[in-house]
């Protein structure tokens, strides 16, 4: 007998969980059957999975996720056979399209890094990634061809004409290729059209074997055709390594609203593997007829999260009045980290950080990019909790959220 969300299990059990080899049959609609080895109720190793949609997977799992070599056959005809890592296509794999065309490519955590395309107008091969996770689209090359591969200065035009490509993606690259790969100076212009937004991207810089290297710039613009958003812009200027932000750089994200409001975030500093590790992050927010605020965090970052050893400064205007606060925090923001918080008036608190638990019960280490002066923790010396709420940045007594023991700014929402 099966219940919704449960499965019928034909193999052995240990402490109430599937253990060993067997078949799990589901009735929840997502999975149909999983045949293979289970460890503590979780499928591991070589398995055969059939989904409710008709899609099938045959290959290796680790902790219930595709990991190692495996083949996934979609119910609509597409297929991928190759290496997986933590549920993502990762490494060399073979993609088969709905039309039966087979292309080998290289993936990085689900993103297609490149595959060999034959230009429709010349049959000249080019190492190309397109815009998605599958090697699809039509490519044309205007330039020389040496030993069957694009070589020298020229122009690439790429269009995704597959039936599922509602985006109508197009790419134009003007620059130099060597051995079929982007090598040298170039300009990449990309446009994606969706039902309610037009997205454009222009990249200028240097490519080495198909990946960005050295100094370059990126400008991405999104134009919204309906809703409260007017547009969004992301720019980056600085160093690159192996296709990712690296070295000194500046990244700015800006959102504009139809009513004149604006939100922006700027990161200036040292980037590693696409994210800033050391530098200054600034956020500005303007609401028409309301708040006009600026916050700055300077110090160390990890995975776009502030990890302490830096300075936080805020400047807000509400109802025409400006409010300032300067806070310095020295220490790690991870759960249990010991640190020192010092305010502009000289008050100092020594405390231990305590991770905040959300709906997913996963700890928040810091406050995303900008913590809004929101270090979550308990100052042991004063038995208070440091908190950050909308329009309120203060030290609040335990079990008394309505009263600030010490207000950093002079306002409370």
Image (cartoon, rainbow, N blue to C red):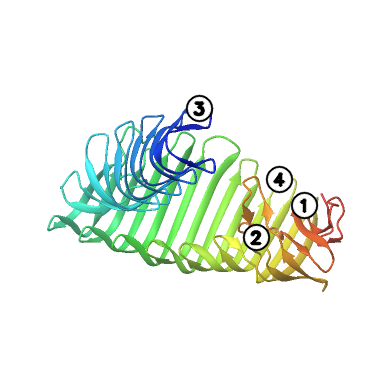
Q: Which comes before the other along the chain, label 4 or label 1?
A: 4
Q: Which residue is mark 4?
A: 288
Horizontally, residue 239 falls left or right of residue 370, namely: left
- Residue sticking out furthest to the left: 147
Visible in this render: residue 343?
no
C-alpha span from label 2 to label 3: 43 Å
State the residue in front, 60 or 180: 60
In percent of width and height, residue 247 lies at: 46, 70
One can see residue 47 in this view: yes
The residue shown at (30%, 59%) is 210
Q: Is residue 77 above or below residue 250?
A: above
Kindly state the secondary structure of the residue where label 4 is placed.
loop
| 1 lies left or right of 292 | left
Instruction: Give how far across and how far down residue 162 sits, in percent.
Output: 31, 35
Circle 2 sits on which residue? 366
The residue labelled by disc 1 is: 391
Observer-nearest of 205 and 326: 326
Q: Is residue 291 above or below residue 9?
A: below
Q: Earlier in the sequence, mark 3 or mark 1?
A: 3
The numbered dot on residue 280 is none
State the CA–CA distance, disc 4 to disc 1.
16 Å
Mark 4 or mark 1, whichever is nearer to me: 1
CA–CA distance between discs 3 and 1? 50 Å
Q: Alpha-carbon neighbours of circle 1 within 10 Å: few (<14), some, or many (≥20)?
A: some
**Which residue in the protein does label 3 denote?**
2
Q: Could you tell me if the residues under marks 3 and 1 are in contact, i.e. CB atoms within 8 Å? A: no
Residue found at x 65% / y 72%: 309
Residue found 30% across the figure and 39% down from its top = 79
Closer to the camera in the image, 376 or 204: 376
């Amino acid at each position: 007998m099966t219940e919704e969300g449960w499965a019928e299990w034909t193999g052995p059990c240990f402490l109430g969980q599937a253990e060993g080899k067997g078949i799990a049959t589901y009735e929840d609609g997502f999975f149909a059957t999983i045949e293979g080895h289970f460890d503590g109720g979780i499928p591991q190793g070589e398995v055969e999975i059939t989904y409710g949609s008709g899609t099938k997977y045959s290959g290796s799992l680790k902790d219930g996720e595709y990991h190692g070599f495996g083949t996934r056959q979609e119910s609509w005809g597409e297929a991928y056979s190759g290496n997986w890592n933590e549920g993502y296509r990762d490494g060399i794999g073979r993609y088969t399209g709905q039309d039966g065309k087979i292309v080998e490519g290289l993936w990085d955590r689900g993103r297609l890094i490149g595959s060999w395309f034959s230009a429709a107008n010349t049959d000249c091969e080019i190492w190309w990634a397109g815009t998605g996770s599958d090697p699809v689209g039509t490519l044309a090359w205007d330039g020389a061809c040496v030993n069957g591969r694009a070589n020298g200065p020229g122009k690439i035009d790429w269009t995704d004409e597959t039936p599922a490509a509602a985006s109508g993606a197009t790419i134009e690259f003007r620059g130099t290729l060597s051995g079929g790969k982007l090598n040298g100076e170039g300009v990449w212009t990309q446009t994606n059209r969706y039902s309610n937004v037009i997205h454009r991207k222009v990249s200028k810089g240097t490519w080495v074997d198909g990946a960005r290297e050295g100094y370059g710039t990126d400008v991405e613009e999104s134009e919204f055709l309906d809703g409260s958003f007017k547009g969004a812009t992301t720019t980056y200027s600085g160093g690159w390594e192996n296709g990712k932000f690296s070295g000194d750089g500046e990244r700015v994200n800006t959102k504009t609203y139809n009513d004149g409001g604006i939100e922006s975030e700027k990161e200036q500093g040292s980037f590693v593997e696409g994210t800033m590790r050391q530098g200054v992050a600034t956020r500005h927010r303007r609401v028409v007829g309301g708040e006009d605020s600026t916050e700055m965090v300077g110090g160390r970052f990890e995975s776009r999260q502030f990890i302490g050893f830096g300075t936080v400064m805020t400047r807000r205007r509400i109802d025409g009045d400006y409010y300032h606060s300067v806070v310095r925090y020295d220490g790690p923001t991870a759960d249990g980290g010991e640190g020192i918080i010092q305010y502009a008036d000289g008050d100092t608190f020594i405390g231990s950080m305590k991770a905040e638990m959300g709906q997913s019960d996963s700890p928040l280490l810091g406050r995303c990019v900008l913590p809004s002066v929101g270090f979550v923790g308990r100052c042991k010396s004063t038995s208070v909790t440091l908190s950050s709420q909308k329009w309120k940045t203060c030290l609040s007594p335990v079990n008394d959220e309505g009263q600030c023991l010490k207000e950093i700014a002079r306002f409370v929402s």
